Image (spheres, grey):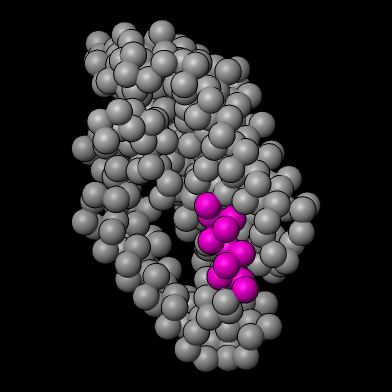
Amino acid sequence: MNGALPFIEALRPRQWVKNGFVLAPLVFARKVGDFHALTAAFMALLSFCAVSSAVYILNDLADRERDRLHPVKRNRPIASGRLSPRAALLEAVLLALLGLGTALAIPGPGPAFVAYPLFYLVLNTAYSFRLKHVVILDVLCISVGFLVRVVAGGAAIQVPLSSWLILCTLFISLLLAILKRRAELIRLQEGKSSTRRVLEDYDPGFLDMLPGPLGAMTIMAYSLYTVDRQTIAKFGSRDLILTIPFVIYGVFRYLYLAWKKDQGGDPTGLVLEDKGILAAGLFWLIFCVLVIYGRGPAI
């Protein structure tokens, strides 16, 4: 088991929670009870988990020399030498093939669906080796990665997506990326080491200016989705507006923790470990399910 541990660690399974965005269209399209849609959605999820892990390995390969100088990242399998570059590259290739092969096998959308994980793989490979060193483009690449997941989730179950939900995904992913860069820059200014060269091009005032508007746009885009005529007609209810306070609390809570507690550097850890954000997310999901599946004809 110990011999397999570096291979498992390199996958970064904790980060798979981000691929949950693939399942969002399944919930909002009222397809959770549809076996074929459920199968397609989870196959798409598996595809993105495999491809995203391949990307993480490629990223660690590209950064292994710099990671060895970082107090935390030096413990990663590749940087620490527990996983050889050759073995890591082979693992990444196999994962990419697994992800793309799974995408090809998804029933319904056909072979064309493979374009989504393939685009994600190409974009993030470019990010790992070049684009993450380009100011602003680095955070945009992260945001587009989330957008691809959501759009792919809709394509897998063959349903159109609301423009408001697409915008909401764009804004919230940009917010998380900006707050992550802000936290990294603060640590760098405090004398703590960093392996991210792009931080030299960011200014604290610039990064302080962006989260507020992005948080407001996230809340506004979601709010407009809940009151949109098509949304109301689709669910046969106006009650989705009742979920807005949970979104407001979640966004404000995240901003508070990023500013007051300097916890914006690990979005996944913060979302999974903060009780306030977890509670808001749980109640939001419960209310959404009650409204979406509680009444109205499916459209």
The answer to which image quadrant residue 38 occupies is bottom right
Is residue 183 shown to the viewer in this render?
no
Residue 60 image point, x, y percent: 44, 21
Which residue is rendered at x = 32% and y = 18% of the image? 82
Which residue is rendered at x = 41% and y = 28% of the image? 181
Query: Taking 115 as reference, is 76 left or right?
Result: left
Q: Which residues are magenta?
A: 36-46
> For this rendering, which residue is in front, 67 or 171?
67
Q: Is residue 298 above or below residue 246?
A: below
Which residue is rendered at x = 53% and y = 54% of the image? 45
The answer to which image quadrant residue 22 occupies is bottom right
Does residue 39 belong to the magenta stretch?
A: yes
Query: Taking 258 as reference, is 163 left or right?
Result: right
Is residue 21 shown to the viewer in this render?
yes
Residue 231 image point, x, y percent: 62, 76
Q: Is residue 278 above or below residue 227?
A: above
